[in-house]
């Protein structure tokens, strides 16, 4: 599902591959045809894609931030970090293609990791903005 047709033009493709094995999870995102030579953020989210970019919910966290709410997602680096979430930031080449992989030392809980959202820029890490990556540009449901 595309929300920004400049950054993610009609015809762009994104594929997500997830492998769980012996307490580890590896997620690989492959994109083609996006806006070339551009930085993007991408994360696993808790709900499936929908017509509203917010439909995908917040980032999936292995250990959920107790201070986060549906209207105020986690920005605490103790929880919003690439060891507790799946961060798939990437930069497209001159053809708009890229690939990103993240491996973590845990497996998804059943029915709690439902989509990957592509965001406007690479993920920030400072307190109060950790995990933030700008507008939601596109969403891919996990199968």
Image: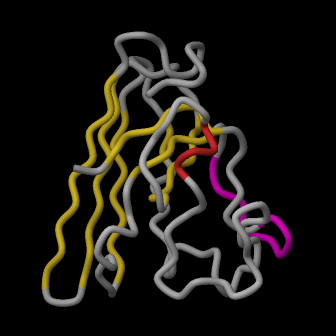
Along the viewing direction, whichever of 100 and 9 lies nearer the viewer: 9
Q: Residue furthest top?
A: 10
Colour mapping used in the image: secondary structure
25 in relation to 86, above or below: below
Residue positioned most to the right:
128
Q: Main secondary structure of the magenta part?
A: loop
Q: How far across and down, in percent of the image, does residue 64 sit?
A: 58, 84
Tell which of 16 and 52 is nearer to you. 52
Side of 78 relative to 98 (left or right): right
Horizontal arrangement in the rendering, residue 127 relative to residue 115 (left or right): right
In the picture provided, is 13 more to the left or to the right than 4? left
Which residue does the image show at 52% across and 76% down from the upper left? Answer: 61
Q: In x, y percent, where is residue 62?
A: 46, 83
Q: Is residue 132 above or below residue 36?
A: below
Image coordinates of residue 80 in percent, x first then y, are 64, 74
* Residue at left offset 33%, top offset 87%: 105
Screen quadrant of the N terminus: top left
Q: Residue 31: x and y, percent?
A: 34, 33
Q: Is residue 111 above or below residue 142?
A: below
The quadrant where residue 32 appears: top left
Residue at (52%, 73%) from the top-left corner? 82
125 inside magenta stretch: yes
> What is the tally of numbered marks visible in this picture?
0
* Residue interval drawn in magenta: 122-129
């Amino acid at each position: 599902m595309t929300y920004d047709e400049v950054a993610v033009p009609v015809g762009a493709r994104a594929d997500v591959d997830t492998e769980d094995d012996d307490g580890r999870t590896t997620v690989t995102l492959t994109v083609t045809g996006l806006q070339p030579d551009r930085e993007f953020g991408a994360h696993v989210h808790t709900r499936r894609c929908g017509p509203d970019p917010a439909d995908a919910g917040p980032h999936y966290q292995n250990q959920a931030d107790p201070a986060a709410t549906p209207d105020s997602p986690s920005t605490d680096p103790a929880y919003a970090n690439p060891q507790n979430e799946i961060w798939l930031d990437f930069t497209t080449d001159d053809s708009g293609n890229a690939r990103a992989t993240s491996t973590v030392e845990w497996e998804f809980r059943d029915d709690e990791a439902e989509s990957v959202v592509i965001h406007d820029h690479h993920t920030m890490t400072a307190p109060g903005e950790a995990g933030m990556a700008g507008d939601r540009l596109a969403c891919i449901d996990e199968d």
